[in-house]
Image (cartoon, rainbow, N blue to C red):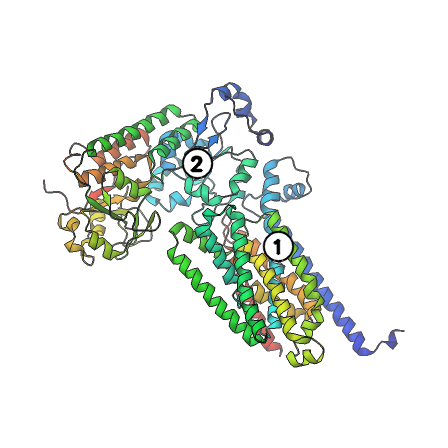
Amino acid sequence: MTHPLPPLGRRAALALGLAAPFVTSRAARAAMPPIIDALGRRISLPAPAERIVLCFNYEEFTAVAGPAGWDRVVGFSKTLWSAWRAAVYQRYLAPIPRLATLPDVGNTDDNSFSLEKVLSLRPDLVIMAEWSFSAIGPQVKQLEALGIPVMVIDYNAEIPARHVASTIAMGQVTGNEARAQTLAALYTDKLADIARRIKDAPSHPKAYIELGQGGAGVIGNTYWKGMWGRLLDFAGADNIAAGRIPGAYGPLNPEYVLAANPAAIFIAGSSWTGQPNAVLTGFDAPEATTRARLAPYPNRQGWPQLTAIRDGQLFAIEHGLCRALFDYTATYFIAKAIFPDRFADIDPVGELRSYHERFLPVTFEGTWMTRLTPLAA
Amino acid sequence: MSAAIPPAIAHWRAASARRVAIILAGIGLLAASFAIDLATGPAMLPIPAVLRSLAGQTTDPMTQAIVRTLRLPIALMAAVVGAALGVSGAVMQTILHNPLASSYTLGISAGAGFGAALVILFGAALPLPQAWAIPLAAFAFAGLACAMVASVGRLRQATPELLVLAGIACLFLFQALLSLLQFIASPEALQQIVFWLFGSLQRASLDQVGIVAAVLVAVAPVLLADGWRLTALKLGDERAQALGVRVGRLRLRAFVAVSLLTGAAVAFVGTIGFIGLVAPHVARLLVGEDQRHMLPASAVFGALLLSVASVASKLIIPGTIFPIGIVTALIGVPFFAWLVLSIGRGR
């Protein structure tokens, strides 16, 4: 099966001096299998992309393509990494020094995405998360009219088929298909393992997850359907927010939390900057700091009476784990918190460490998932 | 023979020539700003490449796309929308005898904002793509706001006081409805609504520029034909009536015309404030009250102000586009303050 570029795109490529990959890949073109992205769209590429604009999911890209894969990247949405996950970004700067000088194309979250900047980088592929893809609307057509395909990846929806499709597609377009297959198989196997362990569970304990960006004094967003909402489902928890918030995320009425009386509470932390009360987690967070930031939560109005608090079932969990290829480790953590017997032999943090050792160029350290009070041994 | 011309007429002709010169100077500045708007952007294209692309001599489809499908519609939209808002503000100030009037005062922009938010929230069910459904709804609700104010004007006498009161009621109504939508919106939709309200030229296409320009071209002759009547209106309702102007009808006709203009302008770019307020004041200061000069001057200076704001929005932080509504106000407010203070000193 061949996937010829539209005539304009090929001419553009010649004019840009990018002809080499297209000309020399005649054999590869025949060998390049069809690429299907997370939304089931067919992407036509004659050969692995050489000039990629990458707009999200940088850790997934790195896992699939390795630090060398970044040589194919000519631009990215910088602040989604450098500001949203500052500590993570800092860690990746050492193995991928190119990040420091790579052009920023802006992002759709703060409306700074610049199509002109993207075009000026002369990409042969744009990789976008679903939420950005739907936000740029008609601009996709402008890119495609120039022969620049837009490939959609989607880890936010937490739909396993999309995790797999996104991973495989990134492997194909960067020439790392075997590694992508390994990663996708790992993810699928781990989810299957979790499903098997909770299959005949007699009950689904109630659980509540809240974003800890503002600390205990602020009622943070909770999640349903996408992101954490689906991880709670995978873990066999009964999400108290289900059907109680209008969209996929938003704050829950604090009174309702008391009435629902969850058996386990998870506060999503991260390495946010400029948030003095935020629950800090991630590479740079010592366990004592994470616990100190978590400590005020049990003193919220009415919380001392909650089953979760009385049973010591209050946890911090890194927010970056709710829309990632390695999010099965967070699902393990949630599942083990509510079904300790069924997951006694599983070490969720160990799983995350091993994923880093196998697939990522940074050393795993810090606090990513923990309990406020250590379990009495 | 020139000695035969009475001094008053000679004076009027000289003043008229001076005003035309000022308008032409404004057009010159607008052309310069338009050129800078085309020449700047995050792609940092060299100026010769931009010129070659405009002349159709480029074979590089990227440069072509950047200049012709991204920058050109934005630069044109800034000029056309600025002109439309400048004219509509000028006419509003005249017919309402109120130097603070603009399309904002009478709730027309608020109506447009509500219409846009409605589609952002519930538009998924519409068969139209959002790129057209939002402007259509914004325009429709701007029209609704205008119709509400105009019908109050028709039921009673269309005095400025009554129109302003009806308009302010309309403004608060649509603002409340908009707040309600924001309250029930999901975070993503809320963000989209806020960005729309900030105003943006970034999504402009040549088709949309064409639509706003067509409305401007259709409405401008109607207003210019009413030029002397509008000037007479500045003398006060009674005197205008004594001069044969049917004041109520004129006011409603002009009001509907500028509402169309405002609706079309804000439908595509969001609520860009300030132009409609400041441009007419600049025009009045430079060419005086005669509507035959003031209306074109308002259009030119409105276009100039928005075009300069469009350039500034790209240059404040290179690579990032500042919301145009915010930039317009940030440029406009100090300028306006200076203007108001200097008028005070002149008198």
Classify mark 1: helix, strand or loop. helix
Of residues B178 and B193, the one drawn nearer to the viewer in this rendering: B178
The CA distance from mark 1 to mark 2 is 34 Å
Q: Do marks 1 and 2 both belong to one polypeptide chain?
A: no
> In the drawing, does residue B153 fall left or right of residue A356?
right
Furthest residue to the left? Answer: A377
Q: What residue type is labelled 1?
A: Val
Residue at x 51% of width, y 51% of height: B321
Residue found 30% across the figure and 29% down from its top: A188
Which residue is located at x 16 percent, y 52 percent? A306
Image location of residue B294, percent across then percent down: 67, 68
Residue nearest the viewer, comparing A286 with A45: A45
> Which numbered mark, 1 or 2, is in the foreground of this view?
1
Location of residue A174 (image quadrant): top left
Direction front: furthest residue: B155
**Quarter containing the C terminus of chain B:** bottom right
Nearest the viewer among A158 and A325 is A158
Instruction: Answer with left or right where residue A122 lies relative to residue A39.
Output: right
Q: Is mark 2 on a helix, strand or loop?
A: strand
The residue type indicated by label 2 comes to Val
Answer yes or no: is residue B288 visible.
Answer: no
Please provide percent x and percent y for residue B201: 55, 52
Relative to B306, is A13 above or below?
A: above
Give the x, y percent position of residue B99.
58, 73
What's the chain of the residue with tag 2?
Answer: A
Task: Read off the residue under disc 2.
Answer: A152
Quadrant location of the N terminus of chain B in the rendered image: bottom right
Residue corresponding to mark 1: B212
View extreme (top): residue: A27
Give the side of residue B244 with respect to residue A366, left or right: right
